[in-house]
Image (spheres, grey):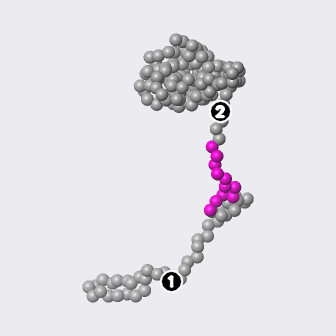
Amino acid sequence: MARQDSGDGRDETDLSALEPGSQTASWIPCAHVHKGRTQDTECAPDARPQVTECIIKTSMHDACSIPGNGRVSLETLPVAVATIKRRSDFISAAASRQYVTLGVLVQARNRCDNIAEARFGITCSKKIGNAVTRNRAKRRLREAAKIMLPDLARSGWDYVLIGRPEKTVARRFSDLKKDIGFALVKLHKKP
């Protein structure tokens, strides 16, 4: 390092861009490293290509309803289920078919479009109770819908499940699933 005087009263220091000597790499303890795993960072020890598996869930009722000729109708195959996101779709479903059971009110509407999935939405008003009770009712309805709708829903339909005060939360989960299944069967039998 050399000091230079520029003549105007300022001192300037000449710093070299090169550091004198090399530094050693920092040492970081690796106590969290898995004992059976190699420290090679290129790939994991058991790296395999990921394979997408397709599992089709069918119920025993569907297997028994296959016609004798061995052909499977489209109504017996599981349907992809998505969620309703727009308010206008909820309002349209409210203006169409509905069926009331002890645990839930189910509204159904045929969208008449070419989308090959069924959609569902859940509504729980303040009549159900406070926020904790409403959230519990919505969780129960959402889980029951995920179990029942792929087998019983029809593609191109919207379903809205509405929780009932003091009934949706208190009803046994198996009975809630039966209520949804019964309502879907009844809604599809209506003209």
User: In the rendered image of this protein, does residue 184 appear above or below residue 146?
Assistant: above
Say whether residue 9 is left or right of residue 102.
left
Farthest front residue in view = 69
Rendering coords of residue 17 (x, y %): 43, 80
Check disc 2: other Cα within 10 Å, few if <14, some if 14-19, many if 20+: few
The answer to whether residue 124 is visible is no
Q: Which residue is mark 1?
A: 20
Q: Secondary structure at mark 2?
A: loop
| Camera-nearest residue between 116 and 153 | 116
Residue 45 falls within the magenta-colored stretch: yes
| Camera-nearest residue between 171 and 55 | 55
Q: Specify the label residue 30 is tagged with.
A: none
Q: Quadrant of residue 79?
A: top right
Q: Quadrant of residue 22?
A: bottom right
User: Residue at 35% of width from left, 88% of height from top?
Assistant: 4
Which amino acid type is shown beneath numbered disc 1? Pro
Rendering coords of residue 94 (x, y %): 46, 18
User: Residue at 59% of width from left, 25% of height from top?
Assistant: 74
Q: Which residues are magenta?
A: 42-52
Q: Secondary structure at mark 1?
A: loop
Q: Which residue is mark 2?
A: 56
Residue 69 falls within the magenta-colored stretch: no
Rendering coords of residue 32 (x, y %): 66, 59
Q: Considering the image in quadrants, where does the N terminus appear?
A: bottom left
| Camera-nearest residue between 83 and 14 | 83
Farthest left residue in view = 8
Sequence-wise, the earlier of marks 2 and 1 is 1
User: Residue at 69% of width from left, 62% of height from top?
Assistant: 38
Give how far apart the Cα atoms at labels 2 and 1 are. 67 Å
